[in-house]
Every structure is written in C-alpha cells, then in structure tokens.
Image: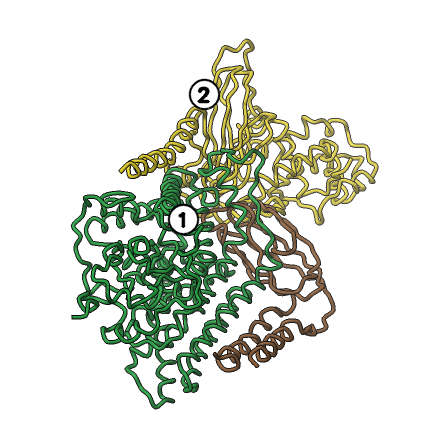
Amino acid sequence: MNPLQEITWLDKATINETQGSLHTARRVSGRLNLYRIPWLRPVFESRWPQFLVRLLALVGFVFAIVAGLFGSVIGSHNFAIIFVWIAWWSAFKLVFIPFGGRAWCSICPITLPGDWLQQGGILSKGHGLGLNLRWPKRLKGSWLQSSAFLLIGLFSALTLTDPRLTGWVFVALFGLAIGLSLVFEHRAFCSYICPIGGFSGIYAQTAPVELRVIDIEICAKHSDKSCYHACPWGLYPVAFRDNAACGLCLECLRACPRDNLALSLRPFGTDIGKPRTANRLDEAFLALVMLGSALVFAAVFVGPWGWLKSAAFAVGSLQWMAYSASFLSLNLLILPGLFALAVWLGQRTSRVKLPLKREVANQSQALLPLGLMAWIAFTVSFAFPKLGYILGVLNDPFGWGWKLLGAGYTFWSPDVSGFSPVLQVILLLIGLFLSANVTRRLAGSDFRRTVPILAFCLAFSLGMFWLLVG
Amino acid sequence: MRQEWLARILVILLLAVAVSIPVVGWWQRSQGVVLHARMAETGGWTPENLTVQVGEPLHLRLTSDDVTHSFAIGQSDQPAVDVIPGEITEITLLFDRPGKYTFYCTRQCSLNHWRMRGTIEVTGSSTTTETIKLPLYVTLGLDIDAEHHADVIPAQKPSALRGALLNQSVPAIYLSREYYLAHTPLELWKALRGEPAFQPLTGQDVWDLVAWVWQSNTAPQELQVGQQLYSTNCAACHGEGGAGDGIFAYSALTPISLPSGEGQGVRVPPVNFTDPSHMLSASPAHLQGKIIRGGMGTGMPYWGPIFTEDQTWALVAYLWSFQFELEKKP
Amino acid sequence: MRWLRWAVFVGLMLVVWFTPIPAAATTPTERSFRINASRFEYSPAILAVNPGDKVTIELISTDVVHGLAIDGYNLAATVDPGQTARLTFVADRQGSFRFRCTVTCGNLHPFMIGKLNVGQNTLLWRAVALSGWVLVGGAWVLKK
C-alpha cells in the first residue's frame, strides 16, 4: 500500500487527489526558502529564539491577567485593555496575519503551559501528562471557532471595556487551553476552538509565507514520516495544500532528516483562486461570520449611534437581547442566505452544476481578501486614535500612579483625521479588487456566474465604506 | 538536558517577575492612604472617614473609579483638586485646629452628587475654645418652612440703577446691613411706600429703590463669587437661569432610594428663583437658612459644613440678581 | 500589454480620485447647535453644515462631566452638568469628521462618538465610484 494511504485521515483532500496533484505541484520553484538562508537558519533551527519570544508573550499575558484582575477599573488606564485590545489586536491584524499568516500561533502563549505538560518538557520531549484522546470527528472543522467568534461579538462591548471581565476571560481561555491539552492529543484548542486561530487560519491563505515540502519524491520514498511525528498539531506537512491549518511551529522543519521542508516567501493570495474539490462548508461559514462581525463591530464601535452602543453594552437587558438577535440573524441567516443566493443565481447561468454546498464552499474563497481588508480598515479606524494610550499604560500599567517611563507623561490622542479615512478607503478598495479577481479566476471562462457574487462583494464594500468613512 | 533545566528556570524566573511587580506595587500602595472616588450611588468616597492629628501632614492619593470628581474641604481655603479616572492626584493636608472637617466633591458626578461627602476627624488639644454661632434665621426665630407669598409684585424687573437715578434719600435705618439681612424686599417696599417723602413715587419706582438698597448691601466681588458658587453647585438643579429647570430638576421629583434609606421624601421641584411671589417674600436670612440646612426630605442638599458664612451670603446676594437688575461691575 | 492595461486602470483611478467635485454654491451662514451629552451618546449625534459656515456648538451634559473634541479641527471643550460650554469655529475643512468625548465618563467613553458633516462627503462618493471601477478591473480588465 502506498505509504500515504496508511495515514487514515487527511483533512484537506481525498486520497486520489493527493496522489495526483502532489506529484506535480510541489517544487519550490522561484520562492525564497528562508530556511536555507545561512544567517537566518540558526534562528529557526534552534528552539531557543522561538522559545524566548513565546516566553515573553506568556509573561505579557500573565501580566495582563494580573493587571486586568487587580489594576484600575478604568479601561483606558489598564494594561490588560490597552495592550491586548489595542496594541496586540492591532499588531495581529495589521502585521501578523497579512505578512505572517498564522505566525501568531507560533508564539501564542495561551497553550504554552499546556503544551509543556503535554509533551513533558519545554525544549525536549519527556514523559508527557495527558490522556491524549482523539478529538471527536463531529467537532472537527471550524464550526466551534465560528461560534466562539460569534460569542465574542455578543459580549464585545463589555469585554473590550471592562478590565476585570477581560482578566477573567483570559483566565478562562488559559484554563480551557491547558485543560484541553491534558485531555486531547495535539493542539486541539488551537485547531478547533480558538477564535484567534480561526481568524488567522482562514486569512493565512492570503499571506506571503508558506511551509511546504520541497521534493515530493523524497517524501514518497521516506517511510518514517518524521515530520508527521514531530508535528505537535498532528498535521501531515506533506499533504499541505494551503496555510489554513499549519501553526508555523517549525518542528517539522527541524525534524526532517533530508531537509526537505521549506519556509518560503511567496506572492500574496497564492492559496486562493484555485477551484477546490473538497467540501469545506465550515470555512465558508467562518468567512461569512468574519464579514458580518466586521460590519457589526464597525457600527457599534466607530459609528455615531449611542443607542446601539448602549444596547450592546447592557448585557442581559432587553435592548441587548434585541442587539444579539440582530447580530445572530445577520451572521447566521442574512449573510449566508444572501451569499448562497448569489452563488445559486450564478449557477443558473452556467451549464456546469455542482452541488450548491460545494459551490458555496468553493466560491467563499473570494470573501477572504474582502474580509481581511475590512478588518484591517476597521482596525485603522478603531485603534489609531488610541495609540497614544499604549505608552500611557507602559508608563503606568495598573493605573496606580506609577511613572515607569518618567514623570509628566500624559495620555494623548494623535490627530489621524488627515490620513486615516483615506487609508481605510484604499484598504477596502484593495480588498474588493482582490476578491473580484479571485471570483473571476474561480469562474474561468464562465464569467456570467461571477455577476451575483461580485454584487455581493460590492454591497459589502459599500456597507463598510458607509460605516467607516460615511 | 542542561538546556531543558535552563529553560525551566527561565520560565519560573520571568513569571515570578511578572507577578511580583504588581504585588510589590500593591504593597507599596497600601502604605499610604488611597482615596477612591465613586458616584454616590455606587459607594461615594472610600474610605469615608479619615483621622489625623493636629499638625500632622495627611498625604492623600486620590483616584476615581468611574467619572471625573474633585476633592475639596468644606469651609477651608484648600483649593479643589480634580480626581481623574485612572490617574492619581496627590495632595498633602495640614490642619492646625482640631475638629470635624467635611470633604466633598465639587464636580457634578451623578444625581446624588451632593451626597458625596466624607469626614476628616482632626484630633488634638485645642487652646482656644470655639463658640458656636447660631445661624441668623434661628436667632430671628424664622420658620423657613412656612409658606410665603408676595401680595404685591413689580410690573417689571426692578433695577438698582434706576433706583439710584431717582436720587432719593432713603432713611438710614433701611440701609443698614442688619435691616437687609432680616427683612424681605416686600417688607422694605411696604415700609418705603408708607414714608411720606416717597408718596409721589410710583409703585415701580419704589421697587427700584428696594433694588438699589439691596445693591448697596452687596459688593460686586460678592456677586462674582456667588455666581461661581451657583454655577458649580446649584445650576444643575435650579437651572442656569434660576428657573428651577436644571438638568437634574426632574430627579428632584422622583423618589431616590439610597442604601441608607435617605431620599424617600417629598417630591418637590427645585425652587424657581425667577418667581417674584416666592422670592420677594423671603429675607436673606431665610434664604441663608435654607441653604445651610437643606430641604428636610426634598432634594435640596444642606450646605452648612461646606460653605463659609461669607460664601453663603455671597450666594444669597447672587440669588437676588434673578429678581433685581444688580450691577455686577464696580 | 499587461502594463498598458495596468497603466490605464491606475490612471483612471487617479482621475476619479483627484477630480475636483464642484461644491454646491452656498453662502456661508451662522449655524447653531445645542448638543446634549450623556453616557454614552451625543444628541444630536450627526450635524450637517455647509463649508464656510460659522458653527456654534452649545454643549450641555445631562449626567456627568463630558467633553467634545472634533477630529481634524483641533477644538475641544469640557462641560459639567448645570453649565453650558460653547465652541465656535468656521467649518473650513470639507468632509465627514468624527467628534469624541475627551473626559473619561465611564466604560464606553472611548466610543462616545458623533459626526460632523461639512458639505459633501466627497471621499465617500469617490470611494463608491472607485468601487465600481475596481470591481470591473479585478474581474475583467486585469484578470490573470
């Protein structure tokens, strides 16, 4: 039996396709392999650099928890609120995802203690604790991640402004991640639950870095599959077709005895625009939830409608229930319904008809540039006026009157009114352009199919324009 | 294996640093007095009562947990300092006389802003004995809760300037400060109306004379001080124009329930200072009494511990400007 | 030939971006608004004036100390309940500007936002126009 067939699960493709396409497409031609750059290689090969950065992230995370639980209750003067929701979240959407894909996962502190316990050591494997159960097949995919993101949206007005609640949410996430590491095998929290993982995974497909095998022939002859055994996520790097699942921990890179894995730079948006044969409706749903959430977050946080903000904030009240009902129906009914309608209308103009579910899953790739740029534009609108607070909380993380950076520091708000709206418009236009491009590429010569989907993308963009700069 | 242990030590060390920084900070903080300000409905000042010795400096670190407040000491020269959410304001107080001092908030922070008060008990021996001075309305035996109306009111707002231009000589008894404090404008009007020298004057002229007499008992600086106090403390309920239509006026009509059980009182709108029938039948002593004592179950706060006597008279003087055209500049 | 297509595409975009849109000729007048600030909204929250108008904003607060600062206009005011703060300025910059609260007034203070529309929101119109063009470009003109 073909060694590849011994692996009983392959999330992303059927066995037939694996054998066919892998043989042809896997040479790393023309892409710069960072792992082969002489001065850069030691940084990736040794576990220490990544460990130190990750440890710093863990220290920051624990510090944020302590600040949230014990520091000032005024959000703007608390390290937990400003550093997480302004500094980190902005860096995440402006730097990590567009330029690194799932790079945050490689230094994320939330599962760090859990990982250590699971593998029985920090830099080397030992006797791990944990039951190492298999993740239930029914719960695989990104459905739980979408649900987690919807939960965030329901409570965001409260969480983003209340340091105590933020602190407790982090404690809960921490506990959940560690708990799952002790019960299930691999990075179950990261792969199936964490909404940040869902966010970065889905948009990582547009990112300019990738981790792939270099020469598939070498892998075919290799019976040990050390990369698979090394991967803490339980993935099979040989079979990677896109960036969605890989957390860039680089263990497989270090484990491969033939140095056959590459961390390459590549053009933006390489993973999308190819017709897919695998049915991933959960990814389509996550892409739509991202769009719906972007619209609602823009309306609530940067819009002038005080009644909406108060409704989103007063958790448990009648107004909040109305807000929640609207939020959920937008994300569960309206947007998916409209998109499915657009896909169906497009199908009617074409002779080739695939099942609607598969077509929706396929076409949902077009929503990725749109969503990513919408979130980046929202971040510019939301976070840029508050950047002055970052130095403020570095000076006084707890709101206790400290002056770590020196006395006389005052909180200031930069005047971004000159370039901020223009920047947002440019970002949204780029997103629309790329989405139109992807839609076109998916349709091939059959361009009449694209019209309803393009209309959907245009409607979303106009909505974002109105909310952000209108 | 050595690397593994090094890594573990590093983890424990850095995490310990991350946790110990706030612990040290917390401990340091509890060494001084940190005064937290919250809206009265959610706790007010914490702690509410402080104690200090005469002559001993009291270092206070003030912060707010919700909105902008300020800190001031009643009946003292200590200027008010703002208490800002998330930031620390440091002040040092020094008391040279023992007694009970009231500290309070001077920036409207909620419907029950005026209840945001605390006390500083200054202990120590006092070399001088203090005599308690009774408020004037008590000495005069005034019932400041009794109903009062003016049966004669002017057709137009009396002007002190017009009164001065009439160039009449008002008998000295009516010009004294004692007379001003103890009598209502209506009483003065009736007295002047009865004077034979003023028979040729019209009723409105006599009102202008009353205004002029009132003006002569008021210094322009007093009016400015009074206006400042009014704007900061009274306008929220009584309105910037004095008509009893301020932002919080409606709240005076709704019963409020505080944990202490206060506030379950009479629903009465704030007094309308532009109503001649009400104001012209009240004397300065009457008004001062109301201000000092408060409203007995209505929403009117008691300002006795807060304003000095001079400040109270200045405020009363300003209130008359809603009834009379008074010159505000010297 | 690809570069030619790109040149035309970008060129037309720049044209749409920089074409001056003639503003409707309006004589500058004096406008006055009375804004109630409360936790956490302004009422009215959306103001519309013409370019060149002399705008006076009377700000009152109905609960706690609030503030108001207009993005891009370098103006700010603070108001206590019971008092009125006044801001007077000439609306010489065209577009849509957000104004925000400047005094911490509670949890949602950073999101206490209103909008000042001076004249036409030309940025929005250009964005809409460019959306259509970008859609066409992405889907037809510049497909790979």
Residue at the limit of the structure toward the top, as seen here: B127
Q: What chain is tagged by disc 2?
A: B
Do the residues at discs 1 and 2 belong to one chain? no
**Taking the image as drawn, is residue A295 in sight?**
no
Q: Position of residue A183 (x, y in %)?
A: 19, 51
Q: Crowding near pointer 2: few (<14 within 10 Å), some, many (20+)?
A: few
| Pick the front one: C103 or A12 | A12
Q: Position of residue B198 (x, y in %)?
A: 79, 37
Which residue is under mark 1?
Answer: A43
**Taking the image as drawn, is residue A458 in sight?**
yes
Question: Which corner quadrant of the image does residue B127 belong to?
Answer: top right
Chain A shade: green
Label ID, residue A311:
none
Q: Secondary structure at mark 2?
A: strand
Label ID, residue B51:
2
Chain B shade: yellow
Disc 1 versus disc 2: distance between alpha carbons? 61 Å
Which one is in front in this view, the residue at disc 1 or the one at disc 2?
1
Type of the residue with mark 2: Thr
Residue at the limit of the structure toward the bottom, as seen here: A351
| Pick the front one: B300 or A295 | A295
Q: Position of residue B184 (x, y in %)?
A: 64, 35
| Pick the front one: A257 or C57 | A257
Q: What chain is tagged by disc 1?
A: A
Measuring 30% from the left and 56% from the top, which residue is drawn there? A252
Screen quadrant of the N terminus of chain A: bottom left
Q: Are marks 1 and 2 in contact (CB under 8 Å)?
A: no
Q: Please say if B152 is above or below A98.
A: above
Chain in brown colour = C
Type of the residue with mark 1: Val
Question: Which corner quadrant of the image does residue A349 belong to?
Answer: bottom left
